[in-house]
Image (cartoon, rainbow, N blue to C red):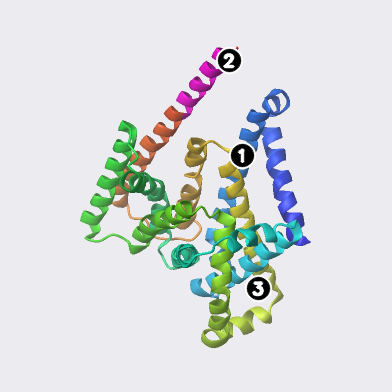
């Protein structure tokens, strides 16, 4: 019931924000405009929630980053299954799994699960182990790597702005490697493996909720085994503390809400708008890592990271250009119809 109320509250909050921020558009705009603004509100809300989750580990000491990850997986699974049960949609997603008939289909379904789990582990582990800045940079590079993967695997052609984006990002990464004689494994893991997860899911036609339900369900036995046999002290600590129980329940609920609002935004917004708003999350992660979490940031990093951010600026410019072209095409189509 609590999860249902919170989900409803997030929907109401996003709707209220949209109406109050742009009342004229909400009251006089078309359905398409209202959907756009609601999608923007969802996207902003989801990115803020992801930022809160990034700093969550620091509030759960003496639990380690790995222990917080384990508890998050359990809390997410309980919250997700609870939400699907309360909304009456659990069978919808189970039916999608029942439709998988061959060994190959199941193998492809399970193949990206380790990537998903490792990314969630890194998300909770990095901020409290001085890898917050490097992980945030991996999320900055993630959309650029998606462009590269699309070009290599699907033969997608890059525009001039996209080539500039990839080029400056490559220069930035090269500069950082030259400066440090290495590059953070956290950065490489995020931008190098996360695109594979989304590509495999896309090729298979599995939506985010179904994939997440499978990933979490498969991991639950390992999570429980970890708590009982490897970190029983963590189990005793949480079981004997009302504070930790409430905090971990909140961790699961916030995780599901963040992912749900993010998915809703991706369905409501044009791809270019959603892509540009997705940069809000790594920006928040970067700021939190340097300020609240105290992760190190050297002045010499400005040059290499500045080149990467310049590449991101070109990618955003490409998105703005595409959005304008799409609007002009829509206007021409309407004029012809009239």
Residue 154: % across, % down: 35, 45
Which portion, as a residue range, is magenta?
323-336
Quadrant location, the C terminus: top right
**Dominant secondary structure, magenta:** helix
Q: How many marks?
A: 3
Label 3 element class: helix
Q: Please say whether residue 98 is visible from this viewpoint.
A: yes
Q: CA distance from mark 2 to mark 3?
A: 61 Å
Residue occupying the point 54% across, 84% down: 231
Instruction: Examine the structure image and report whether residue 335 is included in the region drawn in magenta.
Output: yes
Front-most of residues 276 and 176 = 276
- Which residue is denoted by mark 1 in the rendering? 39
Specify few, some or many for label 2: CA neighbours under 10 Å numbering under 14, 14-19, or 20 or more: few
Q: Residue furthest front?
A: 101
Residue occupying the point 68% across, 24% down: 29
Residue 88 placement: quadrant: bottom right
Residue 58: % across, % down: 54, 66
Quadrant location, the N terminus: bottom right
Q: Please say whether residue 64 is visible from this viewpoint.
A: no
Task: Say left or right for 271 vs 298.
Answer: right
- Which residue is denoted by mark 2 in the rendering? 337
Q: CA distance from mark 3 to mark 1?
A: 33 Å
Label 1 element class: helix
| Residue 232, placed above or below residue 306 | below
- Which residue is denoted by mark 3 in the rendering? 244
| Residue 252, placed above or below residue 266 | below
N-term mark: 3 or 1: 1
């Amino acid at each position: 019931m609590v999860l249902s109320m919170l989900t409803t509250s997030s929907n109401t909050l996003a709707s209220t924000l949209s109406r109050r921020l742009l009342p004229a558009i909400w009251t006089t705009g078309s359905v398409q405009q209202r959907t756009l603004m609601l999608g923007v509100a969802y996207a902003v809300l989801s990115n803020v929630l992801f930022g809160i989750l990034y700093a969550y580990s620091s509030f759960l000491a003496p639990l380690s980053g790995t222990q917080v990850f384990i508890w998050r997986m359990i809390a997410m699974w309980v919250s997700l299954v609870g939400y699907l049960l309360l909304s009456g949609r659990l069978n919808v997603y189970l039916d999608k799994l029942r439709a998988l008939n061959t060994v190959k289909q199941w193998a492809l379904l399970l193949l990206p699960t380790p990537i998903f789990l490792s990314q969630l582990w890194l998300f909770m582990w990095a901020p409290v182990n001085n890898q917050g800045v490097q992980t945030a940079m991996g999320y900055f590079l993630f959309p650029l790597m998606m462009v590269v993967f699309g070009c290599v695997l699907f033969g997608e052609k890059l525009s001039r702005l996209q080539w500039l984006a990839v080029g400056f990002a490559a220069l930035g990464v090269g500069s950082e490697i030259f400066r440090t004689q290495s590059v953070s494994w956290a950065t490489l893991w995020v931008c190098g493996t996360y695109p594979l997860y989304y590509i495999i899911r896309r090729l298979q036609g599995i939506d985010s909720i179904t994939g997440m339900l499978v990933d979490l369900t498969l991991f639950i036995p390992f999570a429980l085994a970890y708590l009982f046999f490897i970190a029983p002290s963590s189990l005793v600590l949480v079981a004997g503390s009302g504070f930790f129980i409430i905090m971990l329940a909140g961790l699961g609920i916030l995780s599901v809400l963040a992912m749900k609002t993010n998915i809703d935004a991706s369905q409501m917004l044009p791809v270019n708008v959603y892509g540009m708003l997705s940069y809000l999350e790594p920006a928040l992660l970067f700021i939190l890592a340097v300020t609240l979490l105290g992760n190190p940031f050297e002045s010499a990093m400005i040059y290499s990271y500045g080149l990467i951010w310049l590449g991101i600026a070109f990618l955003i410019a490409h998105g703005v250009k595409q959005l304008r072209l799409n609007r002009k095409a829509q206007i021409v189509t309407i004029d012809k119809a009239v």
